[in-house]
Image (cartoon, rainbow, N blue to C red):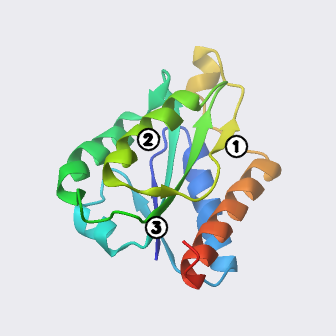
Amino acid sequence: MLAIIWHSRTGAAQAMAQAAAQGAAQAGAPAQLLPAEQINPAQCIAAQGFLFVCPENLGSMSGEMKAFFDRCYYPLLEQIEGRAYATAIAAGTAGQGAQAQIDRIVTGWRLRRVAPPCIILTGADRPDSILAPKALPHTALQKCRELGQLLASGLEMGAF
């Protein structure tokens, strides 16, 4: 099962996570959408692989995603080594800060990146546009569907 662990403030990352879940369903493989603020270590242990989806806020991952890692990091050490992961980041103009932060954290879990980072840029760079609800274009959501399909089918076939 692919665990899609997500957090969203303005709807962009939620739409990305939902699109990835649609892609997994199209592949005929199981995936579970798990809000970062609710997930516990047992749910992570049950997963074969992970897709971490969140916004970049002030150059790093959102606070709720960080809280998930804080809550689950130590209980999962040596429990999920070698499992596949990928990331999808919703960002205004960059995304690499959140991406790098997640990569550093999951290095301790010894997860294996199996797909390039998916960074969706919204262009939001002013307080009003940053805080506004987001609607992503079809092309951005299609990238997320393809990522979900790739991950879920790879897990299902045992490729990851």
Residue 90 in the figure: left or right of residue 66: right
Looking at the image, is mark 2 or mark 1 nearer the viewer?
2
Q: What element does badge 2 sit on?
A: helix
Q: Can you identify the residue that label 1 sits on?
A: 135
User: For numbered disc 3, what is the local secondary structure?
Assistant: strand
The tag on residue 49 is 3
Q: Locate the C terminus by quadrant.
A: bottom right
Residue found at the far right of this picture:
139
Of 11 and 77, nearer the camera is 77
Q: What residue is rendered at 46% in x and 67% in y?
A: 49
Q: Please tell me how many numbered marks the rendered image carries.
A: 3
Q: Amino acid at mark 1?
A: Ala
Horizontal relation, residue 114 to residue 4: left or right = right
Query: Residue 110: x, y in percent?
Result: 37, 54
- Quick one: which residue is furthest to the left in this view? 75
Q: Specify few, some or many for label 1: CA neighbours under 10 Å numbering under 14, 14-19, or 20 or more.
A: few
Q: Are marks 1 and 3 in contact (CB under 8 Å)?
A: no
The residues tagged by marks 1 and 3 sit, at their Cα atoms, a distance apart of 27 Å
The three-letter code of the residue at mark 2 reads Ile
Distance (Cα) linking label 2 and label 1:
24 Å
Tell me which corner region of the image, top left, top right, bottom left or bottom right, holds residue 128: top right
**Is 120 drawn above or below residue 93 in the view shown?**
below
